[in-house]
Amino acid sequence: AMAMGIVALIVVFSTTFVTYHQRDTRILRLANVQFLILMLIGFSFVSLGAILFATQPSLVSCTMRQWLVTIGYTLGLVPLVVKVGAINKLVRSARKMKRVVLSRKYLFQVVLSIVTIAIIYLIAWSIVDAPTRTEEWNLSEKDLDFITVNVDCSSRYQFWVYITLAWEFMLCLSACVLSVQARKVAQEFNESHLLFALAFSHFAFLSMRAVTQILSSTGSASVRAAVASFLLSSDVLAAISIYFIPKFIIIAKKKPTALKKVTISGMN
């Protein structure tokens, strides 16, 4: 599981390098390179969280797991959701012959505000009921001299974890709704199919993580942590394959062309 997390982290770093190196190509500039970097930072956080899930629980690692995964998924989805939402708003306004100006600064402020909400929640969790290392000693029924120790990360109340899962489900739902609304957007700006595929992929892995969490009272804690680590790493690799790899293939097939200035109802 740790090896998978390391592979995911290397893939994210490699994707970041290629994205930055090809930042002047038309397809990446239309996708907004700054937002792409934010997404990749989020995926790197999730990969680091996957690595921590594969390590022995400690006071620090138990807290960092939740921080990295929650902030990572927020950064991984919110920039794309905000961008597609802004394009949808501009297109609707254009159809009504209304002029709407959405600056890049405003879009970054929206992303920052949503990430701040997640950070405030995590701070409250860490102060009130921080996840910590717990040990459960079990006496073997077959051999009374044999004792097994189940080491896990947990808080006193499990609703903290369920809220983070609900937060991720809400992000997935928002992405799906926006992808449906963006179907009629001009193809050059339309990433609805990629957004829907990305949200569906994340929803699938998130559902499996939720099942693992619900079954947390049964089985070995180390096995559950390894499964969670594997799912997180797989989710990151799937996201890179769905959203970034197709762009890189397009770039490789044709020479990069300079991006002409494009204006949509007041937004450059």
Image (spheres, rainbow, N blue to C red):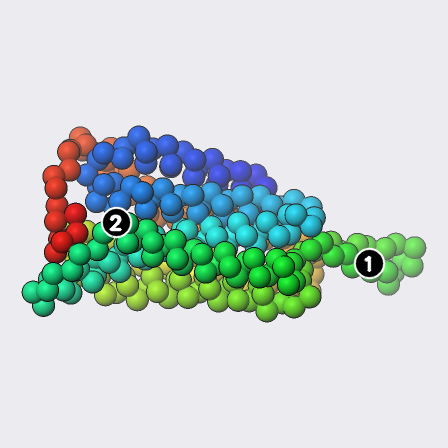
Where on the picture, by quarter, is residue 25? top left
Q: Which mark is residue 18?
A: none
> 22 or 4: which is nearer to us?
22
Q: Amino acid at mark 2?
A: Arg
**At 65% from the left edge and 62% from the top edge, which residue is drawn?**
129
Q: Amino acid at mark 1?
A: Trp
- Location of the N terminus (image quadrant): top right
On the image, the x and y values in percent for residue 248 come to 28, 37
On the image, the x and y values in percent for residue 260 come to 12, 39
| Res 226 visible | no
Kindly give the residue lying farthest to the left in the view shown: 97
Q: Residue at label 2?
A: 104
**At 43% from the left edge and 39% from the top edge, which residue is drawn?**
12
On the image, the x and y values in percent for residue 162 come to 55, 67
Mark 1 or 2, which is nearer the eye?
Answer: 2
Say what secondary structure mark 1 lies in: strand
Q: Which mark is residue 137?
A: 1
